[in-house]
Amino acid sequence: MKVKLFYWTSTAILGLMMLGSAFAYFSSEALIQNFRSMGFPDFFRVELGIAKLLGVLVLLIPMVPRLLKEWAYAGFGITFISAFILHVSEGDPASKAIMPLFALCLLVVSRVFSAKL
């Protein structure tokens, strides 16, 4: 019972965070301008938004094959580590840089308890 609770709680919070992030990638003018100011092309922002939406679906739908879930965990892990490095290299405040690490911790908790289900 505790395993399911930890798994679903961490996965649901992570899913909500990624859905919010993906939505912002498509709708927040400030975020769009941030991507442009860092030199990223628009297609990269759109690609990341779509990947986040698909990753959330893969993690939240129980009947998705285990191998696909592992790819989603890996993709999110790479994304969070890359976001942390980007925020630090851009000189962003610690409050901005810590969020990807918080998401990474949720991802690890979700993955560990996923394996125990």
Image: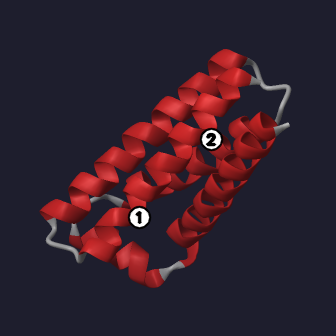
The amino acid on which the numbered mark 1 sits, given as a three-letter code, is Met
- Left/right of residue 60 with respect to residue 103 in the rendered view: right
- How many marks do you count on the picture? 2
Give the position of the C terminus as an image quadrant: top right
Res 59 quadrant in image? top right
User: Disc 2 residue type?
Assistant: Gly
Q: Position of residue 26 (x, y in %)?
A: 56, 68
Kindly report the distance in space between the C-alpha atoms of the residues bearing marks 2 and 1: 18 Å
Q: Is residue 25 placed above or below 28 in the rendered structure?
A: above
Instruction: Please tell me which residue is depicted at 64% across the width and 16% down the height of the picture.
Output: 67
The crowding category of the residue bearing disc 1, from other C-alpha atoms within 10 Å (few below 14, some 14 to 19, many at least 20), is some
Q: Quadrant of residue 55?
A: top right
Nearer to me, 62 or 68: 62
Structural crowding at the residue carrying mark 2, measured as other residues with C-alpha within 10 Å and reported as few (<14), some (14–19) or many (≥20): many
Residue 39: tell me if it is visible: no
The residue under label 1 is: 99
Give above or below for 65 relative to 93.
above
Quarter of the image with the N terminus is: top right
Residue at 66% x, 58% y is 13
Mark 2 or mark 1, which has the lower sequence index? 2
What percent of the width, then of the height, locates residue 92? 21, 74
Per the image, label 2 sits on a secondary structure element best described as helix
51 relative to 3, above or below: below
Location of residue 57 (image quadrant)? top right
Q: Are marks 2 and 1 in contact (CB under 8 Å)?
A: no
Q: Which residue is mark 2?
A: 55
Question: Regarding mark 1 in the picture, which secondary structure is present there?
Answer: helix
- The answer to whether one can see residue 104 in this image is yes
- Seen from the viewer's position, the closer of residues 18 and 110 is 110
The picture places residue 50, in percent across and down from the top left corner, at 59, 50
